[in-house]
Each structure stands twice: as C-alpha cells, then as structure tokens.
Amino acid sequence: MAGSTQIRNNEQVNLLRSDFQARYEPNFALANAVSTILALPGLRGFWPLSSVDYATATQGRDIAGGGYHLANNNGVTFGYWANSLIPVANFNGVNQYLSRADGGVANWADIRGTETYIAAGQRGLTLGCWFNSNSLTADQTLISKYGAAGTRSYFLVARGDVAGDPVQLFISDDGTNTTTLNSAGAYPANTWTFAAGRFNDALAGTEMAVWINDTRTDGATARNSIFDSAQAFGIGALTIPSAYMSGSISLAFLCAAACSDAQVLNVYQQTRALFGV
C-alpha cells in the first residue's frame, strides 16, 4: 500500500493558536525571557531593566539574587518600547548611564575567568543584552568594567564610529593592554539587536567570541585571565564616563562562566520574538 502524505493545514493551525502556544509570539517570549537568563551558569547579575526602585541609587535592579543594583546617573528613564512588551532603559547619548562602584578586591563584578568554583573548561566570562541604537556614528557602551589605562577589565560596545559598525568585545589581563574582537556583521540603527561576548581560555585558538543575533565571530587571544580592576561597572556608558549609549537597552546579563554556544543561542531564540527579530 502506497504511503500517504499529510498536508499541513495552515487554517487549522491558526484556529488552534488560542489552545496551543505558538513558538514565535512576543508574549510567550516575554514569559520565557527571565527564566531563561536566570538559568545561565555562573550568573552574577541580571538587569531586565523592568525592575526599578524609587531611589536613584538602586533604580537598575539586579534580579539574579546578589542585589547588585545599579545607580541611575543623570536621569535614565525606564518603561516599555512603544507598542510592545519590551522593558527598557532609555539613554540620551549625552550623559546618562547606570553604574555600580567597585567593591574592592574580589568584587562582585571582578570576573577573572579563572574562578575555581566553575567547572574546568567552563571558566570564563559571558555578558550580553538586547539593544536598539539610534546612531551609526557613535562609540556606544553596552556593558563595561573598563576605563583609562590601568583600570580595564572587559567591555562590550556597539562601534558605530568605526567602519562596518561592529559590536566589539575587549578584555585586558593587566588593566592596560587589551585584545579586541570585532563582530563580522554590523548592527543596524533603530532595530533591536542581540549582542553577547564570551571569554574562555580553555578554547585554544577561539578564546573570544562575539555575537550579533545568532551570528558568532571567533577570535584568539594569548591572555589567560581578566584583570581585577577598581573601575566601576556600567551599562550605557564607560564609567569614566564616556561612550554614552544613544538608544535603549533591555535584558542585560553578566556571567562568571563561559556559557556554551547553545546557552547563548537559547537566550537569543527564546527572546527574539519579543523584539520582533
């Protein structure tokens, strides 16, 4: 007896959407976003930028459990992206940013990439967020613990001021000298984009990686660890301060582990419908 072919009934699929969850749906992505990021290994801080306090000293609230809340500098505004469910912090590109001062030796944000409480082969750093920039001409900080020479640790940045408009990841092992990795692709203006960076010294030849959406770019570095600097941690600007973000950021996270490709891509895939990507 000849085999039969079952034809997809698109009308029936649409009729059943109210009973069965569609995979690409903003409200479903929102429901998964927080739990997905909270499950990342070595999670040190998670700032969805939906949770705020009344006091400017703690308005960028960390929900990972450590209480590493960020101060609001110069009137960052919080809310939601128009006609969407996206929680946002909005930055004016002039003087606004979120920050938390360094806490001294072995500070919460001093991730060396050699932490022995993380399993061997998985030690490192992973950081990322969703961002929407309205500039392709400026140097715009996403996440940083990076300042003047002598205070550099790590830095994830949208570089609209250089050719190709890449997302860049910087790391330093001595506070001054750095290795930089550029994404192969460009970020677009006025469009939500996922950016992430990773350092893992166990991955010989590809110790660094940077993502724009689901596209990964690899790079090598001879640096075996990340410098423990006294620089403040910042979202939306270097805490010198400079390199101000012009646009919005959402769902920012920091991990004291080198998350796997699958884990980074899972964050992207589970949340992208929320951002219309």
Image (tube, helix red, strand yellow):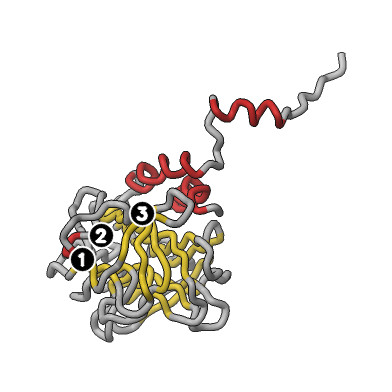
Which residue lies under the disc numbered 1?
Answer: 71
Give the amino acid type for the residue marked by disc 3 in the picture: Gln
Nearest the camera: 97 or 116?
Answer: 97
Dot 2 or dot 3, earlier in sequence: 2
Give the residue type that dot 2 points to.
Gly
Circles 2 and 1 in contact, beta carbons < 8 Å: yes
Gap in Å between the C-alphas at discs 2 and 3? 28 Å
Which is nearer the N-term, disc 1 or disc 3? Answer: 1
Q: Quadrant of residue 19?
A: top right
Report the amino acid beneath label 1.
Answer: Ala
- Quarter of the image with the N terminus is top right
| Residue named by callout 2 | 60
Find the residue positioned furthest to the front: 83
The residue positioned 58% from the left and 30% from the top of the image is 17
Quadrant of the rendered structure where residue 236 is? bottom left
Instruction: Give the percent coordinates (x, y) of residue 65.
Output: 21, 48
In the rendering, at what x and y percent does residue 155 appear? 35, 72
Report which residue position mark 3 lands on: 122
Q: Nearer the viewer, residue 263 or 221?
A: 263
For label 2, the crowd category at 10 Å Cα-Cα, with few meaning under 14, some 14 to 19 and many 20 or more, is: many
**CA distance separating discs 2 and 1:** 6 Å
Residue at the spot 20% in from the left edge and 67% down from the top edge: 100
Name, please, the residue furthest toward the top: 1
In this rendering, would 65 be left or right of 7? left
